[in-house]
Amino acid sequence: MTSEKPSSRSQTGFFSESGELGGSHAQFTEICTALYERELLTLAHMNTNNASMLKRRMGGLPYHIRSVARFMVTQLQLSPPLKVDTHNGSWFSKQPGKCPGLTQDNEKCVQWFKKNTDYGLVVPVLVQSIEGLTIELDSIDMFRESRDKIHLNKHGWFDLGEGQLTKKCSALDTINTLPTDEISKSAFSSSQLSCTTLTLLKPTKAIMSSACCGHMWNYKSKTNPRSLSLREMRLSTRLDWKSFTSTRKK
């Protein structure tokens, strides 16, 4: 994500730039405050000695937060697929009883990605761990010309050529591919719960809604939603809800 150079502007100056939003100033300020508090808390708990990286992330906060807040305020005037929670700076919608990412058709998913893969395309990834299940937003930053392998910015490589869209990341950071239907039909054995399993999903309205709202499930029922990172919030503003294909001008 593009970042701005650090600025000496005060927080008051930061919020005053919402003037372009007219009557929506209060909502803009509320969303900015929520996003700022959440991201600063995340940065405060980061385990890093890289001062340069931390400085870059801090310097980029005004740009990214204003961008997300403007988009969310705009959605308040429309009829978006998701509702806006201005107090928490997040999206919300009714949470399904079961995770919608467990029943995808593997072959149809592979064919969709071979047709629609593009740089910057926002895609969902089902994350299964001992804590439960959630769906995270990620984006494609590399892929082979044949589109048999694609690389996501956070979650790495997925092998479409082999039709294996699920990979297991163990505590030792070794990755083994598993058939998707083995994961969805299993009873989540202790060996599966000892690691994190990632499954690349074909985007649908139900899947992307749960991803944007941070819906979570344990292995019995739904649980409280998680808060999205600022990076995921930025990705949520780039979705084409009609087709979920790339909006990038080619």
Image (cartoon, rainbow, N blue to C red):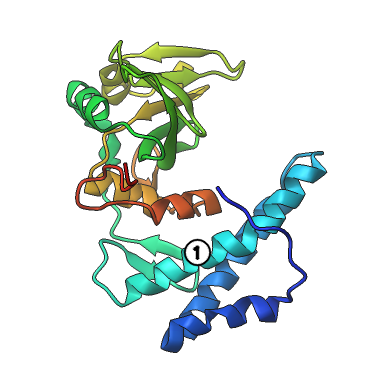
Residue in the picture at 56% in, 71% down: 32
Q: Of the residues shown, which amino acid type is indicated by label 1?
A: Ser
Q: Which residue is mark 1?
A: 67
Can the viewer see residue 59 in this picture?
Answer: yes
Q: Is residue 73 left or right of residue 96?
A: right
- Residue 22: horizontal and vertical position, in percent? 44, 87
Residue in the picture at 52% in, 34% down: 154
Dot 1 alpha-carbon crowd within 10 angstroms: few under 14, some 14 to 19, many 20 or more: some
Note whether 249 is above or below 34 in the view shown: above
- Residue 172: horizontal and vertical position, in percent? 62, 15
- Residue 116: horizontal and vertical position, in percent? 25, 33
The residue nearer to you, when weighing 169 against 58, is 58
Note whether 48 is above or below 200 in the view shown: below
Q: Is residue 86 left or right of residue 54?
A: left
Can the viewer see residue 189 in this picture?
Answer: no
Residue in the picture at 27% in, 73% down: 78
Q: Residue farthest to the bottom?
A: 23
- Residue 100: horizontal and vertical position, in percent? 26, 40
Note whether 96 is above or below 80 in the view shown: above
Residue in the picture at 57% in, 50% down: 2
Q: Is residue 39 left or right of residue 121?
A: right
SS at badge 1: helix
Q: Residue farthest to the front?
A: 250
The mark total stands at: 1
What is the quadrant of the C terminus in the image? top left
